[in-house]
Image (cartoon, grey):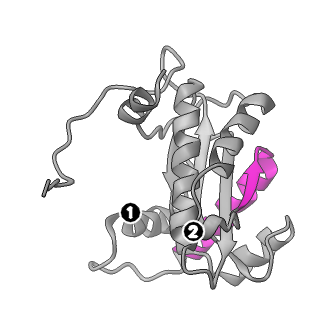
């Protein structure tokens, strides 16, 4: 698979098999993230590769509790609203039950934190596609990156005081008949381009 093919056929996977992902594949995916561009070559992303089901379950519990406390308002971003609604119903899995969640943090006072993390996550999703794995960009931990309970839990795994989570990515084998992620190219209906 060449780069453009990996880009054009990458789709978000939201249903995963319980099958574990091989360590070699995870290392390849994280390396792709580590080689993402960073402002001024800062290389200040901090990757947490979580495949421990107990840790993922605890994160799910903490995320659901945090969203369940939030007020549901009409002016909220659609996905955030959905997270709150599902959490208040009591059965919310923010990472789609993927067997792996890669959480990416960066310095909270660094002006390029979101951009650097987003570049790393995109690289990891493209690498996952090439390795026949499904992936999905996860915003929920970023939305909760000042939640004291979540911060304390993640600090137990090495999150530094001056860091916050800016994105994460769910990784795993797609729960499809073939086991492969959906790679159907979808037409572009937005993202205007002007050539000058």
Residue that carries the numbered disc 1 in the rendered image: 79
Which of the 4 quarters of the picture holds residue 154?
bottom right
Please tell me whether mark 1 sits on a helix, a strand or a loop.
helix
Within the magenta stretch, is there residue 66? Answer: yes
The answer to whether any part of residue 116 appears in the image is yes
x, y percentage for residue 130?
A: 54, 27
Identity of the residue furthest to the top in this view = 178
Q: Residue at x 12, y 58 (%)?
A: 196
- Magenta segment: 46-67
- State the residue in front, 185 or 18: 185
Q: Which circle marks residue 39 in the picture? A: 2
Which of the 4 quarters of the picture holds residue 123?
top right
Q: Are marks 1 and 2 in contact (CB under 8 Å)?
A: no
Q: CA distance from mark 1 to mark 2?
A: 28 Å
Q: Which circle marks residue 19 in the picture? A: none
Please tell me whether mark 2 sits on a helix, a strand or a loop.
helix
């Amino acid at each position: 698979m060449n780069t453009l093919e990996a880009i054009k056929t990458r789709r978000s996977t939201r249903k995963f098999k319980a099958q574990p992902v091989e360590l070699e594949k995870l290392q390849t995916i994280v390396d792709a993230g580590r080689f993402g561009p960073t402002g001024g070559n800062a290389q200040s992303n901090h990757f947490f590769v979580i495949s421990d089901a107990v840790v993922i379950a605890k994160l799910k519990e903490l995320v659901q509790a945090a969203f369940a406390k939030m007020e549901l308002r009409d002016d909220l971003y659609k996905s955030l609203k959905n997270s709150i609604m599902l959490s208040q119903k009591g059965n919310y899995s923010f990472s789609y039950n993927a067997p792996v969640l890669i959480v990416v943090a960066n310095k909270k006072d660094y002006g390029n934190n979101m951009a650097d993390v987003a570049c790393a996550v995109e690289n990891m999703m493209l690498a996952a596609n090439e390795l026949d794995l499904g992936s999905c960009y996860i915003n929920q931990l970023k939305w909760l990156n000042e939640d004291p309970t979540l911060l304390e839990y993640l600090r137990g795994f090495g999150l530094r005081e001056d860091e916050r989570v800016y994105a994460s990515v769910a990784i795993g084998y797609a729960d499809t008949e073939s086991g492969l992620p959906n790679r159907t190219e979808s037409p572009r209906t937005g993202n205007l381009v002007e050539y000058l």
